[in-house]
Structures are given as C-alpha cells and as structure tokens.
C-alpha cells in the first residue's frame, strides 16, 4: 500500500487553490490541496500502525506554527508544475526533517520546497501561458497549522486520511 504524510491547509486556502487545480491539475479529484511532508512510500497495513506511532510521537515534539503564501512559482525546467509557494520556516522544515528521518526508507528524490500544487502535467506552451498570468497575481495568505495527516492511497488512485496528528499535544 502507498502512504504519504501531508498538511492540509484551511478550507479558505483549499478553495482558492482548487479554483486553479480543477482546470490545471489532472490529480484534482484524487487528493485535496496539501503540503507534502513525506512523499509516497510503500508500507503494509501492519507497518502503518508503527508509522502512526512514530508520527504521534513526532507531533508531540512540535508546536503549531504559521504558514504564509505570497506568490506562484514553478519547478520548470525539472517539470512543468506550477505551485503556490509556501514560505519556508524553521518549524515547517524541522517537522519535515524529523518525519523523513524517522520514516526514512530512502533518500528524498528532491530538496524540500514547501508548496501547494496549482497545476501539473502541462505542455510547455500551457505551462508558459498559465505561469505567465498567475505569477502576476498576489497570493497573500497566512494561517496557523496545528495538525498533519498520514494518508493512504485507495485502489482508484485517490488518497484518504489514515490518521490525523495534532501538534504539541502529549499523545
């Protein structure tokens, strides 16, 4: 089974992101807008219980923190992904590092760039047009993050929550 660890932003931010994703992201219907803390990894259902125990402990080591978005960016030329940039913070990075250290099966493929995907799998022309218009817009948004989630992938390719972990509580 595939699992992943993510932060879901507020409904307000999800609604804004989805207004673009429904047009530009073929994964729109498979997963809610999110910030990936741990990329998809394989685990059995028995392993998932151990993973959840580790994540519960990690959540207790961290306190709620704020995230801020300000602009759109892109991963081009690596791939044609357009995303809402989440300003890096020590708290977000520390949470990412600890999760990946504790659950590490292999080295991450990419450096951690906190973001929320707006569009992906775009042709070069689509990417250029969409990115050109979106980068002119302001996306000033700030909110408090107080939880993260362990997800698993269903047979139809969609993702659903296995367990939610609240930050800063004795679990």
Image (tube, rainbow, N blue to C red):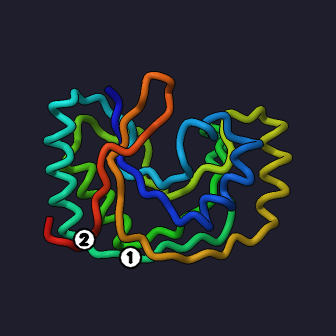
Q: Position of residue 108 (x, y in %)?
A: 35, 41
* SS at mark 1 in the image: strand
- Is 74 placed above or below 67 here? above
Which residue position is annotated with label 1? 65
Vertical relation: 81 (above or below) 12? above
Residue 62: assigned label: 2
Residue closer to the observer: 53 or 131: 53
Q: Is residue 18 left or right of residue 143?
A: right
Residue 61 is left or right of residue 78, and the answer is left
Asked if disc 2 and disc 1 are in contact, CB closer than 8 Å, the reply is yes
Most foreground residue, 75 or 26: 26
Which quadrant of the structure image shows residue 81?
top right
Tell me which residue sits at (77%, 32%) in the image.
123
In the picture shown, does residue 40 fall above or below 84?
above
Residue at the image position 14 percent from the left and 50 percent from the top: 53
Q: Which mark is residue 146?
A: none
Q: Position of residue 75 (x, y in %)?
A: 62, 47
Mark 2 nearby-residue class (10 Å; few <14, some 14–19, many ≥20): some
Which of the image's four quarters has the N terminus?
top left
Q: Which residue is painted at 51% across and 76% down in the image?
A: 143
* Viewer-side residue, 100 vs 148: 148
């Amino acid at each position: 089974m595939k699992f992943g660890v993510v932060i879901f932003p507020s409904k307000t931010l999800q609604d804004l992101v989805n207004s673009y994703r429904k047009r530009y992201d073929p994964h729109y219907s498979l997963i809610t807008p999110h910030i990936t803390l741990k990329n998809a990894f394989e685990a059995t259902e028995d392993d998932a219980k151990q993973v959840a125990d580790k994540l519960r402990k990690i959540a207790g080591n961290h306190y709620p923190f704020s995230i801020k978005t300000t602009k759109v960016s892109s991963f081009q030329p690596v791939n044609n992904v357009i995303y809402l940039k989440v300003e890096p913070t020590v708290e977000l990075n520390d949470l990412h590092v600890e999760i990946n250290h504790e659950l590490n099966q292999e080295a991450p493929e990419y450096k951690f760039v906190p973001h929320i995907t707006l569009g992906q799998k775009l042709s070069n022309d689509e990417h250029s047009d969409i990115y050109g218009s979106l980068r002119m817009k302001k996306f000033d948004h700030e909110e408090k993050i107080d939880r993260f989630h362990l997800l698993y992938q269903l047979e139809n390719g969609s993702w659903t929550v296995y367990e939610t972990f609240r930050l800063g509580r004795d679990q």
